[in-house]
């Protein structure tokens, strides 16, 4: 039995399925693979805690640790008695890394990796939607972010290979595909001819007409290209849900983060999309308690939720990561950071509740997941308990709770 425990982003979820396949190719048995996240110190702490618990519960299993935290701080895991092997992000998708005679710590220079090959992952255990990696790495150096040191520089999967994988996933029965990457809107800058993310979206939808739904993971709104705007306006199969790497609603904090957008850019993007797709919904990554953030600066982030119409928030209490410029800036008290994160989450919960209430009485198409739960095109979760095994289900929304819609077959 091979268990893969995933922390962090959708890209990690995708790569976990790739690792599961590569480990099977290597004949690995009775193993637990931890695919870690390095975004926050808390994510690292949780992975270490889970590793210790796994060793107590399965003392005879081989424990392998990989992912961004293993790449950025391999010694942290190598010093753990519970860990049998540590693999870097450049090694985790190589089947040879899982052989019994592989070296215990195999973490190489991630910046030496210059290309990105398709992984041809065509099964996602327990999921009705498929993830498709089209990009990895990041060329930007935001002052708070350790991820480029875990993922390396930006690199893209060639467009033809992406289309082939999208076609294969559709033939496998997946009704929805989510394009994933570290810096998704930088897609194609390293490829011949410099194709864009928008061009890739339009190509997939044109060449894989059987695909019912295509969704984007987190994007940088300032990098939206002309073809992406055309797709948003004209392609109904591109789902009207956009998760933004916004990070803050205050211009001074955004400058100190070394972001490339301002507060007005986030608001303008959401407004423009909403004019083209009135049913669109928006999410955002937001950091609470960034160094030097005053109460007034934080209030600007709170207000951004309403001003941009954000309904799905991923709130991160600022966590200093060793080696980043933000870790050397004047820090806020931890209690203040936690309190601001709680206030921001509460604002997000209220905004989500209002968004769900507005959907009452509408007719939606759900991508069913499990236990009668499904997702609307705008990513709202809905409960519809009714017989049937079809992945897509037409429903009428009869009500809403604070977290999800209530629906019945239309």
Image (tube, grey):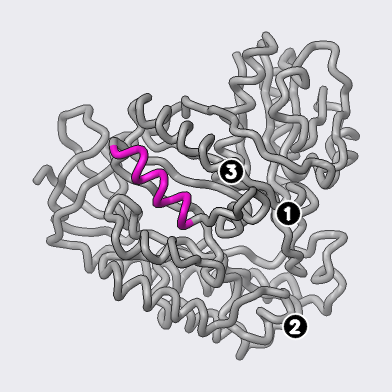
Q: Residue at x 16, y 35 (%)?
A: 386
**Rendered location of residue 286, percent (x, y):** 57, 69
Q: Nearer the viewer, residue 239 or 98?
A: 239
> Quarter holding the N terminus?
top right
Q: Secondary structure at mark 2?
A: loop
Categorize mark 3 by other alpha carbons within 10 Å: few (<14), some (14-19), many (20+). Answer: many
Q: Secondary structure at mark 3?
A: helix
Categorize mark 1 by other alpha carbons within 10 Å: few (<14), some (14-19), many (20+). Answer: many
The range drawn in magenta is 198-209
**Rendered location of residue 96, percent (x, y):** 76, 18
Q: Earlier in the sequence, mark 2 or mark 3?
A: 3
Q: Nearer the viewer, residue 388 or 93?
A: 93
Residue 292, labelled with which disc?
2
Categorize mark 2 by other alpha carbons within 10 Å: few (<14), some (14-19), many (20+). Answer: some
Closest to the camera, between mark 2 and mark 3, is 3
Q: Residue at x 49, y 53 (%)?
A: 217
Residue 147, labelled with which disc?
1
**Rendered location of residue 142, percent (x, y):** 73, 67
Count of numbered circles in the view: 3
Q: Residue at x 60, y 23 (%)?
A: 20
Q: Earlier in the sequence, mark 3 or mark 1?
A: 3
Residue 71 horizontal side relative to residue 31, left or right: right
Residue identifier under label 3: 11
Residue 368 higher or lower than 64, as above or below: below
């Amino acid at each position: 039995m091979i268990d893969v425990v995933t922390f962090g982003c959708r890209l990690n979820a995708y790569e976990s399925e790739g690792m599961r396949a590569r480990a099977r190719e290597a004949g690995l048995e009775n193993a637990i693979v931890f695919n870690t996240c390095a975004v926050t110190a808390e994510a690292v702490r949780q992975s270490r805690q889970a590793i210790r618990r796994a060793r107590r519960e399965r003392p005879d299993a081989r424990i392998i640790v990989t992912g961004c935290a293993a790449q950025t701080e391999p010694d942290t895991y190598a010093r753990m008695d519970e860990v049998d092997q540590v693999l870097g992000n450049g090694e985790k998708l190589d089947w040879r890394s899982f052989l019994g005679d592989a070296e215990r710590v195999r973490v190489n220079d991630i910046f030496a990796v210059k290309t990105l090959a398709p992984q041809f992952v065509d099964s996602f255990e327990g999921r009705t939607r498929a993830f498709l990696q089209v990009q990895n790495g990041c060329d930007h150096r935001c002052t708070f972010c350790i991820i480029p040191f875990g993922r390396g520089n930006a690199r893209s999967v060639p467009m033809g290979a992406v289309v082939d994988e999208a076609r294969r996933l559709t033939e496998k029965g997946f009704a929805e595909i989510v394009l994933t990457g570290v810096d998704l809107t930088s897609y194609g800058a390293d490829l011949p001819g410099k194709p864009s993310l928008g061009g890739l979206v339009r190509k997939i939808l044109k060449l894989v007409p059987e695909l019912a739904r295509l969704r984007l993971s987190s994007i940088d709104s300032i990098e939206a290209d002309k073809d992406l705007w055309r797709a948003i306006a004209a392609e109904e199969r591109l789902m009207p849900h956009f998760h933004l790497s916004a990070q803050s609603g205050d211009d001074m904090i955004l400058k100190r983060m070394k972001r490339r957008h301002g507060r007005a850019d986030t608001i303008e993007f959401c407004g423009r999309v909403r004019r083209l797709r009135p049913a669109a919904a928006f999410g955002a990554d937001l950091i609470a308690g960034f160094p030097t953030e005053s109460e007034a600066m934080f209030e600007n982030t709170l207000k951004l939720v309403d001003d941009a119409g954000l309904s799905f928030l991923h709130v991160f209490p600022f966590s200093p990561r060793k080696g980043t410029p933000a870790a050397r800036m004047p820090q806020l008290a931890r209690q203040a950071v936690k309190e601001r994160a709680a206030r921001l989450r509460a604002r997000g919960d209220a905004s989500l509740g209002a968004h769900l209430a507005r959907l009452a009485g509408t007719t939606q198409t759900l991508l069913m997941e499990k236990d009668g739960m499904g997702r609307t095109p705008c990513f709202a979760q809905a409960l519809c308990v009714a017989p049937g095994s079809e992945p897509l289900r037409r429903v009428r929304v009869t009500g809403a709770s604070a977290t999800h819609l209530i629906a019945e077959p239309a």
